[in-house]
Image (cartoon, rainbow, N blue to C red):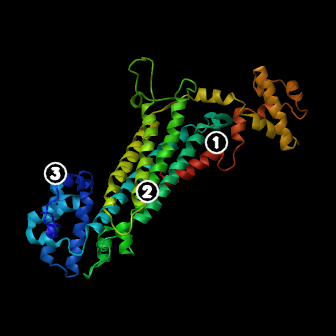
Amino acid sequence: MKLWGGRFTKETGGAMDVFHSSIAFDRRLYRQDIAGSIAHAKMLAKTDIISEDDADKIVTGLSDILADIEAGKIEFSSSAEDIHMNVETLLIQRIGDAGKRVHTGRSRNDQVALDMRMYMKEGCAETKARLAALIRVLLNTAKAHTYSVMPGYTHLQKAQPITLAHHVLAYAEMFHRDVGRLDDCVGRTDVMPLGSGALAGSTYPLDREIVRAELGFAEISRSSLDAVSDRDFLIEFCACASTIMMHLSRFCEELVLWSSDEFRFVEMDDAYSTGSSIMPQKKNPDCAELIRGKTGRVYGDLTALLTIMKGLPLAYNKDMQEDKEATFDALDTVLACLELFTQMFASLRFNTDNMRKGASRGFTNATDAADYLVKKGAPFRTAHEIIGSLVLSCIKRGVAIEELSLDELREFSPLFAEDVFGAISLNTCVAERKLPGGPAPEAVLRHIEYIGKLYDV
């Protein structure tokens, strides 16, 4: 008979047992479930709700179960439905009536909320650690390429010259914001719900602060109704994970482009590429493409959670059992993608010569030519029009601005002088953009120093 079966005259059918059971996926919560039960038992003894002797038996029994699970000695049963009932059933089998007291003053509703909050605190910490590892790799790449000029793009059209360091640091900023979002998420996850019961708390004199302190939570929940029915912290994590994946996907898209023969800015390491079954010359950037593709998977997890929760009345509903697979999948996916992307990026070989050649084409110094005229006294809109006409002429002739002679330049404006060629060189175009946030080496080095202090680089 089920531990909850006293009111029932029939057992659930075999198909219903499987359909109803969540042990196939919530088994990963065993450590959190046992830790929560140990803390709860200790509190029950301190408040004289159960005896010290029973509490000691419960703690010892649960500790032994934990050791046996980790040693692979325990096979969970779908008939016990979930990790909570599996552990409690094992405890009762091992220590007898004392085990029947562990659930005093507790419901599976506040128990599962506790387990998920504990699990996701750890999940957020691991995600942050992998983001930090990636940021450190990006900072080291930026340090090595402070002077590596490349084209910057808008609309995927060449716009202005920047450096590889400047480009990479843009992603470091994105991932740094992701760390901040996870910090915010942890703040709302770090709330201890045990003591909320099924929905209305408990008549036992539970000391929730004892459990909070034992488990290392920042605070206790203020509403028993909300505590057992809240899954906002899981939705928020999946939103954080979706944003991380979006950032990874954008970077992967660029690396896929950069590794193509049309760009040849980067070569993927063989360890993160695959070949073709028919075309022997192919080297496909599969790792980057898979990460890009898995972004949609994490978006789906977020959408699933939002959809599951959107119509649920207070308090707990069985629909909420569906929260776990989506959350676990989002966490597993983002952790795997962060790890692989970091390894892949660390192994890249950048073709800085091609990057510089790319920056020298496409009139990336046109803005600097307009700024040159402004500094000589021309209104900006006038300078913009002059350089637009100059670029059109160069396109028709198949030359770059800097390939024209001074006399040819003066056909467009008498303000051009010999110093224009230095002003519109790639190195000058980059070096003069030294405002905070710009691509000039001195600005980039300040940026690296700032982020580096936060991540011990």
Q: Secondary structure at mark 1?
A: helix
Residue 393 - label? none
State the residue position of label 1: 441
Query: Which dot, 3 or 2, sits closer to the camera?
Result: 2
Rendered residue at 46%/54% (across/down): 239
Look at the numbered discs 1 and 2 and tell me whether their residues touch, using CB distance below 8 Å. Answer: no
Query: Which residue occupies the extreme right position in the image?
Result: 414
State the residue position of label 3: 71
Can residue 220 be seen from the camera position used here?
Answer: no
Q: Secondary structure at mark 3?
A: loop
Q: Name which residue type carries label 2.
A: Leu
State the residue position of label 2: 306
Specify the quadrant of the image occupied by residue 160.
Answer: top right
Left or right: 433 in relation to 283: right
Q: Which callout, 3 or 2, points at the residue further toward the start of the chain? A: 3
Q: Report how far apart the C-alphas of labels 1 and 3 lie in the structure.
A: 54 Å
Q: Which callout, 1 or 3, points at the residue further toward the start of the chain? A: 3
Q: Report how far apart the C-alphas of labels 3 and 2 lie in the structure.
A: 37 Å
Specify the quadrant of the image occupied by residue 224.
Answer: bottom left
Relative image position of residue 134 (x, y in whole percent) = 46, 45
